Each structure stands twice: as C-alpha cells, then as structure tokens.
Image (cartoon, rainbow, N blue to C red):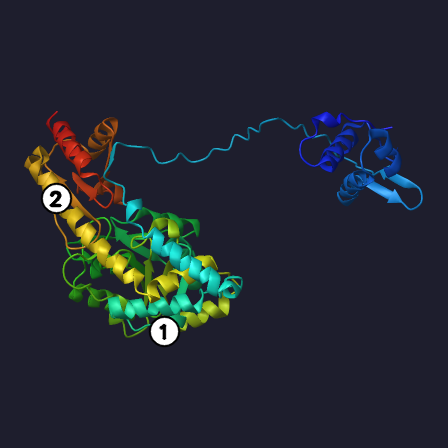
C-alpha cells in the first residue's frame, strides 16, 4: 500500500500525490507493470477523498506514467530510457545575461523621458474609455499592418504636422523600428547592398547584420550624406536621417535632398529609407519637408516612432511604404501578426484623434526648448566653456561640444566614468577610422541641471590634468 507524508504537502493535495507517485516511478520504487492500489483503498488507507486520488491518477495517465485496464485497475507504464531528474530547491542555470546599464551620478548620454512628463492620467482615462466602449474590438486579431483606426490617426497627424499626404493603408505599425527594419529586409531582400551614414546609429548596423547584410558606409559633410559618397559605396538602399542626423545633428538642405533622390531614380531597385525619428522636436521654425513628400517616383520609405514623442517603452513605430511596396507587403508578409497589442493601438489612436498628442508635443517642445537653453547656459557659465565650443543646431534632443585637448577620447571617457559621469564621444559612432576627435554628445532631455553644472566642472578638471 502506498503511503506518503501528507504534512509535507503544499498546494493542492492531488498535485502532491501525483508528484510522489511520479517520483517513485522515476526512481524505480514502482516498476513497469506494477499494479497501484484502487482509488477507494488508497483513499481509505490515507483518510482522503477518492476524488483527490482520481485527479492524481488521471494526471499520471495523461502524462504516460500510468495506464488503466477496465475492471482491473491502474498499472505503471513502460518508461524506457527515462531517468530521474534531480530537483533542487533553487536552480542555477548559469545563463550569461547581458549586463544592465551602469548607474552614474550624471548621465549626459541618457535620452530617456523624465517620467514626470508622461501624461499618465490622460492615457489612463483614454484607456478606460477604450476598454468600456470597444471591448469587442480589443479581442479581435489585428491586421498585419495594424488596426485601421491607428493608421488613420497617424495619416492625419502626418498631414497636419509634416504636410504628408498618405493613405492609411500605406502605413505599417510595429513594435519598434528594429522590428520594422527586419520587415524591410524581408521585403527588399538581403542580397542588396545597404548603405548607412558614417558616423551613425550603431543599432541599425547591428540589426542588418543579423540578416546577413554587410553594410556600406558613406561619410558626411556639413550637409549630410554626399551624392558622390553614396555612389562610391555601390549601394542599392540608403538608410539616412536627413531631418536630424544622429549624432552630428546635421539637417540636410533641399539641394542635397534632391541629389539623393536623383541617385535613387538612376537605377531600378534603389530605395531610400528615411528615418524621421525625432522630427517633432525641431525647436525653431517649421519642420523640414520630408524626402517622402518630395519623392515623385515611389523611392522613399518613411519611418518614424513614438519613442521620442511619448516614451521608448511604448514600443510603437510605423513606416509608410510606396504603393507598389505596400502591395508586396500584403501579398508576401501579411501572414505576420501585428506586434503591438490592440489595447495600445486603440488607446494611441484615440489619444491622437482627440487632440491629446498634439497638446503633449507642444508642451514637450516648450519644455525641451527651455531645457536646451538651461544646458547651454550651464556650460557657458562653467570653466568648461573656456576649453570647448558648443556646436549648435536647431533640432533634436542633443547637441555637440568640441573640446580643445590633446587627450584621446577613450582616456577622457574613462576618467569621467571614474568620477560617476557618463557621456558619449562622437568618435564612438564612426564605423571606419576617422580624424574627427574630441567631440562629445550632450543629451539634455532628462538631465538635472544642478548635477550637470558639477559635471561640467569635473570635465574641465580632467582637461587640465
């Protein structure tokens, strides 16, 4: 007769009995073909319910540890090659997780939003309305390109804010631009030559590399990627940020834009991926017209994200495809499910449609304009100003400073980190060797100005050592 110490049971009793019998089978205490006690006798002997025994036996049968013969009882199944797995109270799997972002007293590389600036109360209110009024739609499968309500809202936003005439059905919504880059590679093919800006955003190259694409690099001048540099790469696809290049801050003028469009029109199969990642935050004057708006030959793929305008954690980005490419997308890739939840899609659609997004952008532009001025004033009032030059531009959430020093960038960065200060050097974003040194990137979106002042003084001290 089977007996177990039920005082050790935690959770449902049938699970404890199931585990005890399973362990006995795996350890060889119960052998193949051995008959188990009937439900009634097992229950009576241990003073428990027959239903509890029934549930334990049923689970063991479903997993193949027992089998039953009608009118005869329960027997141990044949388990060839199976060994007892030692269970430990705590697991140590030795998984080499990537290190988290180190903590610094002052982080001038941090481009995240201040949590206090996110419109939590409005977002929550809109979400509650959506859950109450559109519960049915929330449970439906989203189309591959995203729900139509959000695509319509984005199209209206692009029309009013960027002067772009876009059909909602040209828009594809996805969870982050990295995911959309992957879709583009599948759409355009990984046999083509892709060109990125040098210096540039390293994650773009990392994503393309995972699709077995070896990127070409085109250097920049004061107007952005050059026509000659792009032609020299032999590329078919140019991935650029003409409205505010990261990290130099360059805004490509109209003349250069037409040159890049002319390059795309020279040959069949050439495309431009226009990454417009922070266009909402051009702080002076009107936003620069997009390449997509200037394109008359369906050569430009427009990409944008809500990571800068709302928060990176919302993970909603979108791309606008030329008509022939959106048709190919739905013909070849529509089996993909949209990677953004319906809850977030419907909420963001209402947030835009009801005017909250425009109000938020206006409020954030004012905040960032003041934050930018404070950061520049902090530098100019510090001793650092005597050994650096602020390289101003009119857009985006960062700017550059050029430092007068003979020290190498790596030495400066290391000394700053030892003092609890993190900053990025422009040299870190070059893909090929460059002579451009001693240029540093100031992200000011989430900086405590009092701490920033102390950081400037420490920066100066390191320069003088």
Q: CA distance from mark 2 to mark 1?
A: 41 Å
Residue carrying label 2: 376
**Crowd band around label 2 with a 10 angstrom C-alpha radius: few (<14), some (14–19), many (20+):** some
Whole-percent x and y of residue 233? 28, 56
Whole-percent x and y of residue 306? 33, 56
Residue 446 seen in the current view: yes
**Crowd band around label 1 with a 10 angstrom C-alpha radius: few (<14), some (14–19), many (20+):** some
The quarter holding residue 436 reads: top left
Whole-percent x and y of residue 272? 31, 63
Residue placed most toward the observer, 112 or 179: 112
Whole-percent x and y of residue 451? 19, 34
Q: Does residue 113 lie above or below 81 as drawn?
A: below
Look at the image and tell me in which quarter the N terminus lies: top right
Residue 167 has which mark?
1
Residue placed most toward the observer, 199 or 341: 341
- Does dot 1 land on a helix, a strand or a loop? loop
State the residue at coordinates (29%, 46%).
116
- Decide if residue 2 is on the left or right side of residue 275: right
Look at the image and tell me in which quarter the C terminus lies: top left
- Decide if residue 222 is on the left or right side of residue 133: left
């Amino acid at each position: 007769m089977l007996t177990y110490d039920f005082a050790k049971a935690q959770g449902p009793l049938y699970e404890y009995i199931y585990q005890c019998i399973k362990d006995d089978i795996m350890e060889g205490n119960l052998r193949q073909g051995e008959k188990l006690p009937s439900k009634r006798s097992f229950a009576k002997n241990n003073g428990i319910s027959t239903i509890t025994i029934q549930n334990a036996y049923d689970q063991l049968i479903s997993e193949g540890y027992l089998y039953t013969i009608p009118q005869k009882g329960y027997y141990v199944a044949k388990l060839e090659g199976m060994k007892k797995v030692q269970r430990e109270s705590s697991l140590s799997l030795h998984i080499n997780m990537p290190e988290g972002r180190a903590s610094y007293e002052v982080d001038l590389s941090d481009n995240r939003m201040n949590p206090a600036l996110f419109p939590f109360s409005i977002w929550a209110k809109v979400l509650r309305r959506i859950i109450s009024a559109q519960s049915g739609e929330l449970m439906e499968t989203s189309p591959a390109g995203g729900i139509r309500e959000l695509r319509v809202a984005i199209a209206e936003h692009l029309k009013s804010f960027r002067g772009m005439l876009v059909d909602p059905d040209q828009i594809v919504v996805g969870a982050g631009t990295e995911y959309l880059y992957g879709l583009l590679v599948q759409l355009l093919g990984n046999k083509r030559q892709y060109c990125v800006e040098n210096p540039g955003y390293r994650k773009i190259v990392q994503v393309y590399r995972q699709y077995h694409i070896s990127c070409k690099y085109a250097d920049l001048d004061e107007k952005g990627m050059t026509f000659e540099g792009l032609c020299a790469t032999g590329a078919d696809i140019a991935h650029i940020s003409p409205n505010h290049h990261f990290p130099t801050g360059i805004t490509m003028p109209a003349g250069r834009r037409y040159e890049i469009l002319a390059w795309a029109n020279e040959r069949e199969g050439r495309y431009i991926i226009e990454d417009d990642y922070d266009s909402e935050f051009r702080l002076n004057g009107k936003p620069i017209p997009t390449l997509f708006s200037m394109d008359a030959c369906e050569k430009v793929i427009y990409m944008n994200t809500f990571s800068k305008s709302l928060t990176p954690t919302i993970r909603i980005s979108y791309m606008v495809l030329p008509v022939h490419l959106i048709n190919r997308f739905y013909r070849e890739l529509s089996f993909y499910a949209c990677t953004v939840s319906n809850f977030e899609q419907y909420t963001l659609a209402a947030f835009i449609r009801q005017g909250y997004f425009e109000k938020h952008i206006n409020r954030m532009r004012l905040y960032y304009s003041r934050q930018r001025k404070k950061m520049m004033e902090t530098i100019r009032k510090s001793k650092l100003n005597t050994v650096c030059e602020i390289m101003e531009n009119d857009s985006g959430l960062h700017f550059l400073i050029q430092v007068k020093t003979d020290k190498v960038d790596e030495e400066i960065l290391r000394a700053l980190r030892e003092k609890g200060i993190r900053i990025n050097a422009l040299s870190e974003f070059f893909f090929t060797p460059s002579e451009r040194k001693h240029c540093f990137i100031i992200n000011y979106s989430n900086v405590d100005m009092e701490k920033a002042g102390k950081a400037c003084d420490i920066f100066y001290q390191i320069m003088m050592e």
